[in-house]
Image (cartoon, helix red, strand yellow):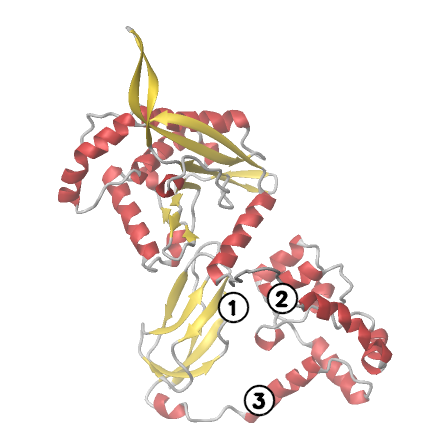
Amino acid sequence: MSLVDLVMPKLGESIMEATILKWHKKPGDSIKQDETVLDIATDKVDSEVPSTAEGVIEEILFNENDVVPIGTVIAKIRVGANAAVSNTQPVPAPIKEEYEEARVVEEIPYQPTDNGQRTTANTKSAIRFYSPLVLNIAQQEGIGMAELENIPGTGQEGRVSKKDILAYVATKGSSIKPQGTSQPQQTTSVAVTEPQTTNNKPQTEYQAPTVYSGNVEVIEMDRMRKLIAKHMVDSKHTSAHVTSFAECDVTSLVLWREKVKKDFEKREGEKITFTPLFIEAIVKCIKRYPMLSSSVDGDKIIIKKDLNIGMATALPNGNLIVPVIKNADQLNLTGLTKQVNGLANAARTGKLRPDDTTGGTFTLTNVGTFGSIMGTPIINQPQVAIMAVGAIKKRPMVIETPQGDSIAIRHMMYISLSYDHRIIDGALGSTFLNAVSKELENFDVNRSI
């Protein structure tokens, strides 16, 4: 018999950590290989973690709602003939005593006695683990290792989580000073001297609940809405947003779809919507203007050769998610239709895989689905552009012909492009948008499929 480590799996190229939502097993429970052990969540999607071995859950190392770096051991599984017996063995006392001692040190960081000083020294000499994400945030905010060591951690064994460092950054510079500064004498005098305990008042005022006047209803944001809000605000702080608009006549496209949709569904078992037609036009134009499929890394521009098109999808609860069609330029219209329908259904039923929402290089959002005729979408970082299509409306339009001008009823649609003005100027953004408009307007009504 032996112990097998269950680690937090890699969930995508850009994902460095995940939050534990729910444990389906507890220590002592039997587990089969590939059976779900826990549910986790990233800033992209929720998913299940299966067991990598058959045996008995020996130990669970993290609690629900803990944020855990990718590759970290989160549980141990005992495998072998005596696995069922081993789970009754108590945890060795030294480990428990060490944990209790750590708790005492954390709760009482400074003591005027010699014993307290030795405990503090031992704690300071311990090596503290920091996830790559925490180190990256610290570097961006100009927080050195000495300052990072003094940030209280709420993670496993007092580790600093993403939540801890963001909270520290938010309150940095205020009158509240973190515990464990480089002035132990001053900190000790505050802890012992009774009159100076009033220094805690600013912290109480900061945490005081807000009182709302009038007849209001207060709704707590769910986890996904909080992530969306942060993602949108971060994008505005990162990119210099500019939005250009164009109007296009999609009469030919509408008439063609109306003509082929029944035969297409009968032959392919899929309904053909306007979305794959829009994506097809976008891909053709990105090939002509590759800067629209890029990202910014400091003073470098990274042009993405793989055209992975994200499509913003509304969920039943009102939230938004962006599944990605990988290598969209290598798919024909039938393949695009199946990808669009499959990812949209998986998003609405909660069956998206972590990889389904990563790697996007350009995003399309259809604000016309909800009746809007146009929109100013926010760029999906680290991309540099996003296109919105509005509702298709019949309007009287002036048609120019060799015989003269005439007025006709046409299917019209507004499209808009938000782009990062750091690297995409108005000329390029407007030229690309006009190219997409011409692709849709010149759609071949006699096209076969």
- Secondary structure under the numbered disc 2 in the rendered image: helix
Q: Nearer the viewer, residue 256 or 103?
A: 256
Give the mark nearest the N terminus, 1 or 3: 1
Direction top: furthest residue: 403
Asked if 433 appears above or below 316 in the picture, the reply is above
Asked if 336 appears above or below 408 in the picture, the reply is below
Badge 3 amino acid = Lys
Relative image position of residue 147 (x, y in whole percent): 73, 64
Which numbered tag is attached to residue 96?
3
Residue at 64 percent across and 67 percent down: it is 209
Badge 1 amino acid = Val
Foreground label between 3 and 2: 2
Q: Quadrant of residue 213?
A: bottom right
Asked if disc 1 and disc 3 are in contact, CB closer than 8 Å, the reply is: no
Which numbered tag is attached to residue 68?
1
Residue at 61 percent across and 70 percent down: it is 129
Q: Position of 320 compared to 107: left or right?
A: left
